[in-house]
Amino acid sequence: MTDPRPADSRPVVPRIAAERLPELLRSMPKAELHIHIEGSLEPELIFALAARNGVALPYPDVDSLRRAYAFTNLQSFLDIYYAGASVLLREQDFYDMAQAYFRRAAADKVVCAEIFFDPQTHTARGVAMQVVIDGLHRACVDAKKDFGIDASLILCFLRHLSEEDAFATLEAAKPYLDRIIGVGLDSSELGHPPEKFARVFAQCRELGLHVVAHAGEEGPPAYIHAALDVLHAERIDHGVQAIHDPALMDRLARERIPLTVCPLSNQKLCVFPNLADHNIGALLAAGLAVTINSDDPAYFGGYMNDNFLQTFAATGLDSDAAYQLSRNAFEGSFADAATKQRYIDLLDETFLAFAH
Ligand code: HPA
Ligand SMILES: [Zn+2]
């Protein structure tokens, strides 16, 4: 069998026949680097938690809530996403939400999950930072025990809120920084460029936290430049608008900056008209360190395997791309070098098993 890939550091992995691709995509080990845990809250759990906590919802039942999931852009989603999160009040609620995600992720062969959470969505409703972090952290510890998933937490600042609010959030999180691997930036992108949070992120870096940021989901390439140059983001969440800036594309490829791309999210929020129009193939072909992720799986119609299977079916990506996407995620994770190698060995073993 000939291997068409360039003779760089990549190992020789066998190409898998197209008819076995769905099975390969389902069974290969994965890292999920872009998942908002509040976006994993399924309508059934929203209603169960609302009943448990005596929270009134503006929808009579699960089906009518689900019918409201017809989004036209990022903001139309965020409005419903923040409303859904209003049922989360107690430590056990955060635990139950995260545990449900880990159960689904394990079924999709996720072995490493770096989870975003939005504390301001909760502290603004009077829920203490400790309640949020205690529940999520306990679920992360049990994820290893129950599902074999290495799970860690990334605190996201809401960019539609002020710098002052972000600083207050960082202050409230300081007693718990040993349970957080990094910080991110999410919520409404347009009109809220990364520069707004330059000083907050500078302090986060001084505290030894990893830094990621949403940029170039709906916003222009300039926001990706700013995430890299001003916030010193180590990964770009989404980043698909980089395609409009050739110099930026060169830089992202040269520096191997991971892009945590979320195809079903992009489809549901009308970033691309159809999945078949997604630019993931072009980003990969340009040598960018692209990964596939679910973003807000309960709202966008799919978890990791749905994202992989539907994207490959719609765009015609092959098994070489599958290998590269999974490997990019392991290399782009914040795991230590030995753990990354263990993940990559697992990936290689899967491909070798499929070749026989
Ligand atoms: O896709 C997203 N973009 C920005 N903020 C978010 N918060 C949850 N999901 C998203
Ligand atoms: Zn996101």
Image: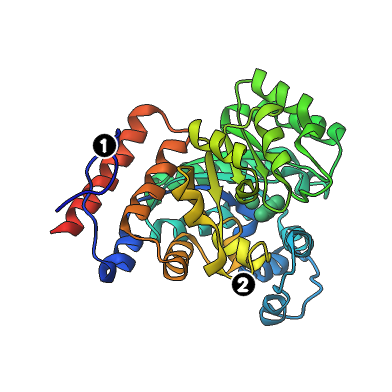
Q: Which residue is mark 2?
A: 44
Tell me which amino acid carries mark 1. Ala
The secondary element bearing badge 1 is classed as: loop
* Residue at horizontal 67 percent and vertical 81 percent from the top: 63
Residue 153: x and y in percent read: 57, 39
Which disc is residue 7 wearing?
A: 1
Residue drawn at 25 percent across, 46 percent down: 348
Determine if residue 327 is in view. yes
- Residue 288 location, x and y as percent? 49, 42
Q: Position of residue 179 (x, y in %)?
A: 57, 32
Q: Residue furthest top?
A: 206
Res. 41 in view: no
Q: Residues within 10 Å of mark 1 (few under 14, many from 20)?
A: few
Rendered residue at 82%/34% (across/down): 196
- What is the total number of numbered labels drawn onto the structure image? 2
Q: Quadrant of the C terminus?
A: bottom left
| 52 horizontally vs 355: left or right | right
> In this orientation, which residue lies closer to the viewer: 134 or 262?
262
Near-viewer residue (103 or 283): 283
* Residue nearer the viewer, 113 or 191: 191
Q: Is residue 161 above or below residue 318?
A: above
Along the polypeptide, which appears first: circle 2 or circle 1? 1
